[in-house]
Image (tube, helix red, strand yellow):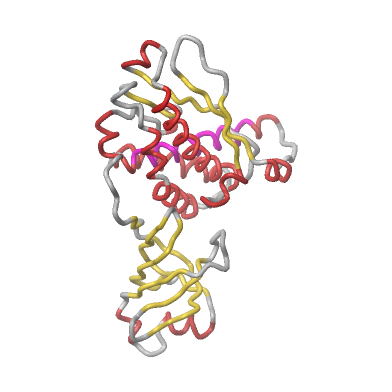
Amino acid sequence: MQVEKVDPIRIKFEGLDADRHIVELEPLALSLRGASKLIASGGQVALTGRYSKREIGNSVKVYALPPQPGSYDIWVMVRAGFGLAAAVAVPLLPYIDVAIRTAATEATEALVNATIARWANKSKEMDAANEVAVRALEEMGHTSRAAIQMAERLALSNHAAVKMLVNPIGTSAQTLQVGHSESGAFLVTETDRVEIEKVEPIEIGAEQVMTVIISELDLVTKTCKVSVVGDDQPNRRVSGQITDPVLGVPNNPYSTAFDGQAEIAVRCKPQYSEGEIDRIFISDAVQE
């Protein structure tokens, strides 16, 4: 289910300069750039039901709202891009509109905080935020599997944005928080910043089930090319490596699916590059 906008989201700085209602401009500018990327990513999922890093700018817009007096809180608003806003401008009953927008706001904030927690290596906070995100997206009509996959891709593709977001911490502010605690928001500290700024050499996603179509299959090297069913780039093919020993058996599920150009569900771990799947490691064929 698509909506046009989410409720305003607060970015709150506390401690050091922020307690005097000021923050050093250069770190703040970098932080807001990172916040814009993160919130736009979460907003794209909430407003469109899909995640495509290349199309975020056309899908959603993030606007700064007037600052709150007597604090260093920055409020931002996420709206659908012009084309999408026109497409989803369907009248809804007031109470339905409020419920949907609340779910979209919770999903956006939770996805942002799950991403921050992922790179801060805070598994408890990440799991809590992901739980909120999945529940909110399910309320909007998305399947649990789709919600989990979008959250995973979003988190893995936004390490650089999280690094920018935390730039003022430790120099001009002690902590920051994006959104409400009910949506999984937590205080990001200087310890978190140190963890976030570590280099992540390889981005490997969690094991999951994907439905694919095999377009190339090499029984000697056990490599393949697949297209992922439901991908926002349907013509894109991804390299794969099959470790399942059943591949060597005649009439195995992989060769049968390849011969018939049929969909096959596989258990795999995806490898990401800039948030896009560029390789999958297949361990098993799944009967669904």
Find residue 179 and report its image quarter: top left
Q: Is residue 222 one of those drawn in magenta?
A: no
Q: The N terminus lies in which quarter of the figure? A: top right
Find residue 176 and report its image quarter: top left
Residue at image x 50%, y 10%?
A: 69
**Position above or below: 271 against 82:** below
Residue at image x 34%, y 21%?
A: 172
Image side of residue 124 versus residue 279, left or right = left
Q: Nearer the viewer, residue 204 or 92?
A: 204
Q: Position of residue 51 (x, y in %)?
A: 52, 50
Image side of residue 128 versus residue 191, left or right = right
Q: Is residue 99 one of those drawn in magenta?
A: yes
Image side of residue 75 versus residue 124, left or right = right
Magenta: main secondary structure equals helix
Q: Position of residue 159 (x, y in %)?
A: 38, 45
**Position above or below: 257 against 52:** below
**Position above or below: 187 against 38:** above
Residue at image x 54%, y 80%?
A: 261
Q: Position of residue 279 (x, y in %)?
A: 40, 66
Span highlighted in magenta in the image: 98-117
Find residue 218 and report its image quarter: bottom left
Q: Position of residue 225 (x, y in %)?
A: 45, 75
